Amino acid sequence: MKQPKLIRKYVNRRLYDTTQSRYVNLEDLRRLIVNGAEIKVIEQATGDEITTTVLLQIIEETQRSGSKLLQPEFLSRLVRLAATDNDPTLPDRLNNALRSATEVLSAA
């Protein structure tokens, strides 16, 4: 597995790509991910990893720009599942299902 690109998020909400030594925006990160890069986002002030939050922001921006990948019904079910299911294997199973779907699409 590739080493993820380290992105630092500063208090002013700017994102900095430490491998390219430049500021980036969510669209830049989306393009990196689409092209196969893995990212890891660290909040500079606290040292907390906030990758999931930033990825959700990218998905939100993509949805706003016209992509309808995540339908309200799917998101509602996901919220309900997260609130009621205490199955520790669920995140891995969801990830594996998405990985399988991606592999099928790549092979086509």
Image: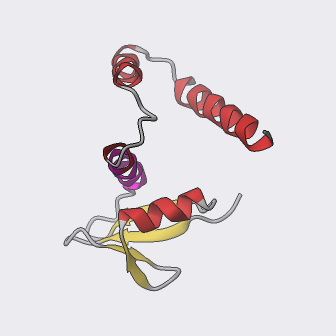
Is residue 25 depicted above or below 63 in this figure?
Answer: below
Q: Please identify the residue farthest to the top as the structure is shown.
A: 84
Counting from the top left corner in percent of width and height, residue 11 is at 21, 70
Counting from the top left corner in percent of width and height, residue 9 is at 32, 68
- Main SS, magenta region, reads helix
Q: Quadrant of the N terminus?
A: bottom right
Q: Nearer the viewer, residue 13 or 32?
A: 32
11 to the left or right of 37:
left
Kindly indicate the quadrant of the structure image that contains residue 103: top right
Q: Find out whether residue 55 is within the magenta segment.
A: yes
104 to the left or right of 71:
right
Is residue 71 depicted above or below 25 in this figure?
Answer: above
Is residue 21 depicted above or below 42 in this figure?
Answer: below
Q: Please identify the residue farthest to the right as the structure is shown.
A: 107
At horizontal 45% and vertical 86% (from top left) the residue drawn is 21
At horizontal 33% and vertical 51% (from top left) the residue drawn is 61
Q: Please identify the residue farthest to the bottom as the structure is shown.
A: 21
Q: How many marks?
A: 0
Q: How is the image coloured?
A: secondary structure
At horizontal 33% and vertical 20% (from top left) the residue drawn is 76
Q: Find out whether residue 90 is within the magenta segment.
A: no
Q: Please identify the residue farthest to the front as the structure is shown.
A: 66
Magenta stretch? 50-61
82 to the left or right of 19:
left
Q: Nearer the viewer, residue 63 or 15?
A: 63
Kindly indicate the quadrant of the structure image that contains residue 92: top right
